[in-house]
Image (cartoon, rainbow, N blue to C red):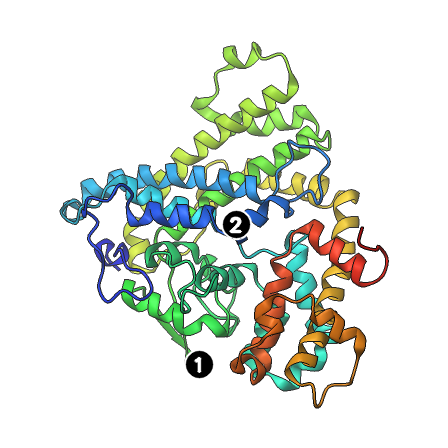
């Protein structure tokens, strides 16, 4: 892979790459950021769980605040790396590329990194998968091929995110028409649900696009010349290099900030936080300044800030050390795994798992989320079958009424949707995954008659 090809300013529908030096006030990559931040799916993240479902405290992160913070960290990582790459490859400057462009691509991809996640955090993905694997949705297996079935029984927020970004508002299947470098940097797992590969490589732990968007991803990969790999007749890819920075930004934030949330909720002892975060802060920590801070929450904010600053500098350096291996596809490890602070990070992760992710309040709502998501999927799939196959479906007045609650593109399905079981199910999954936590709960309660509209 080479940087000039990887950074082509190319959007869906373009016949050739755009000129970065065309005198616009915003680069194409800055436009990507703006398109994401003004999109409806992004706005919904304000009421989606990061770690603490339906938080009562205004300082606890949701998906929206988490995504904005990851984007901020990602921009800094991109600019640090970009400045060094411009020195190493002068031909990039000849293409009017600046270090701001690197920052903008990583910032935009980071901003969108959770846009496909369902309600109730990662348990929402499991709830959708469970509905098809062991729930009422198992009845659909004979209707689908092996690849389509894997998309559903291993439902993946990353793949749903790629679907949203490339189909949101349709735009003749180009979605909100992000640039190909941003779409590629967004894709942490540049493969389909099959084949399932050993989890040794960071890019192969999950999958990044559904069968419905497979060709579109291939188009992106072809234009940017991502390294292709063939296995059992299936093609998948090595990551776009900037994906490693998007992943690093997310890793930094969720390790440190989820830990901070647990600290602020008094689920984690403050002396434990000091023991782990002060070493990570390294040279960024000034003990004299720290001792002057009187309030515990302000101390927690200080420790979080200096630890993040330290990790940004270190992970940018690690990327640059391995840049040539990344370009030739031989490097495939999360940057944070190579941090000299990995022991402290792993302990933070372990404490967060026990004290935050497995807190009773979190598990109770996640468990309820299984009922909500599974229930909505079942009601909506039955309703959609009534619309698409009124002659063969069991006549149900209840299902017909529920059908009236579906979004317009499902209430008035295209011929393609009527004739394709997989797309029907994927559309319902996308719709349910797009609901906010509170909307999903409210809708479920009303449809079940537990609560009546006011």
The answer to whether residue 114 shows anywhere in this view is no
Q: Position of residue 367 (x, y in %)?
A: 77, 55
Q: Nearer the viewer, mark 1 or mark 2?
A: 2
Secondary structure of residue under mark 2: helix
Q: Are marks 1 and 2 in contact (CB under 8 Å)?
A: no
Residue at far right of view: 450
Q: 428 or 260: which is nearer to us?
A: 428
What residue is disc 2 on? 42
In this view, the residue farthest toward the front is 454
Q: Is residue 266 left or right of residue 25?
A: right
Rendered residue at 54%/28% (across/down): 304
Disc 1 target residue: 232
Residue 337, percent across and down? 48, 46
Q: Which is more N-terminal, label 2 or label 1? A: 2
- Is residue 151 visible in the rendered structure shown here? yes
Gap between marks 1 and 2, in whole Å?
A: 37 Å
Tell me what residue is drawn at x 48 percent, y 16 percent: 286
Above-or-below relation of 286 to 309? above
Indicate which disc residue 147 carries. none
For mark 1, give the secondary structure: loop
Q: Residue at x 66, y 32 (%)?
A: 58
Query: Which residue is more in the foreground, 453 or 249?
Result: 453
Question: Of all residues shown, which one is farthest toward the bottom?
Answer: 391
As drawn, 20 above or below 374: above
Q: Nearer the viewer, residue 405 or 366?
A: 405
Crowdedness of circle 1 by 10 Å Cα count: few (<14), some, many (20+)?
Answer: few
User: Could you classify mark 2 by the number of other residues whose Cα lies within 10 Å: few (under 14), some (14-19), or many (20 or more)?
Assistant: many
- Residue 1 image offset from top left, x and y in percent: 26, 60
Q: Left of 364 or right of it: where is 79?
A: left
At horizontal 52% and vertical 39% (from top left) the residue drawn is 253
Where residue 384 appears, x then y in whole percent?
A: 67, 76
């Amino acid at each position: 892979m080479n940087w000039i090809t990887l950074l082509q300013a190319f959007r869906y529908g373009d016949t050739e790459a755009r000129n970065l030096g065309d005198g616009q006030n915003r680069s194409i990559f800055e436009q990507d950021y703006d398109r994401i931040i003004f999109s409806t799916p992004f706005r919904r993240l304000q009421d989606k769980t990061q770690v603490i479902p339906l938080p009562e405290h205004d300082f606890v992160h949701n998906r929206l605040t988490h995504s904005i913070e990851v984007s901020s960290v990602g921009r800094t990582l991109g600019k640090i790396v970009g400045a060094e790459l411009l020195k190493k490859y002068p031909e990039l400057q000849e293409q009017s590329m600046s270090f701001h462009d690197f920052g903008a691509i990583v910032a935009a991809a980071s901003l969108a990194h959770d846009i496909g996640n369902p309600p109730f955090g990662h348990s929402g993905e499991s709830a959708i998968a469970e509905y098809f694997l062991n729930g009422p949705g198992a009845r659909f297996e004979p209707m689908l091929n092996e690849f389509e079935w894997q998309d559903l029984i291993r439902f993946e927020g990353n793949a749903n995110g790629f679907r949203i970004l490339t189909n949101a508002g349709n735009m003749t299947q180009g979605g909100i028409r992000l640039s190909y470098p941003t779409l590629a940097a967004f894709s942490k797992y540049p493969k389909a649900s099959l084949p399932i590969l050993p989890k040794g490589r960071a890019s192969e732990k999950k999958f990044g696009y559904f069968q419905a968007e497979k060709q579109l991803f291939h188009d992106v990969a072809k234009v940017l010349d991502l390294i292709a790999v063939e296995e059992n007749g299936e093609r998948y890819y090595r990551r776009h290099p900037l994906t490693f920075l998007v992943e690093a930004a997310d890793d930094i934030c969720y390790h440190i900030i989820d830990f901070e949330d647990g600290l602020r909720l008094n689920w984690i002892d403050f002396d434990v936080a000091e023991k782990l975060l002060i070493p990570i802060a390294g040279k960024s920590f000034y003990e004299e300044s720290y001792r002057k801070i009187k309030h515990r929450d302000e101390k927690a904010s200080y420790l979080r800030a200096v630890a993040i600053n330290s990790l940004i500098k270190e992970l940018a350096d690690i990327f640059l050390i391995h840049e040539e291996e990344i370009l030739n596809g031989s490097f495939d490890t999360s940057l944070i795994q190579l941090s000299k602070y990995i022991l402290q990070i792993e302990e933070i992760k372990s404490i967060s798992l026990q004290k935050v992710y497995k807190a009773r309040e979190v598990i109770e709502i996640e468990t309820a989320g299984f009922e909500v998501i599974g229930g909505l999927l079942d009601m909506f799939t039955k309703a959609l079958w009534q619309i698409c196959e009124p002659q063969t479906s069991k006549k149900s007045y209840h299902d017909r009424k529920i059908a009236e609650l579906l979004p317009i593109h499902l209430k008035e399905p295209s011929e393609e949707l009527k004739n394709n079981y997989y797309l029907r199910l994927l559309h319902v999954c996308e719709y349910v995954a797009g609901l906010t936590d509170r909307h999903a709960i409210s809708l479920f309660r009303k449809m079940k008659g537990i609560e009546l509209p006011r």
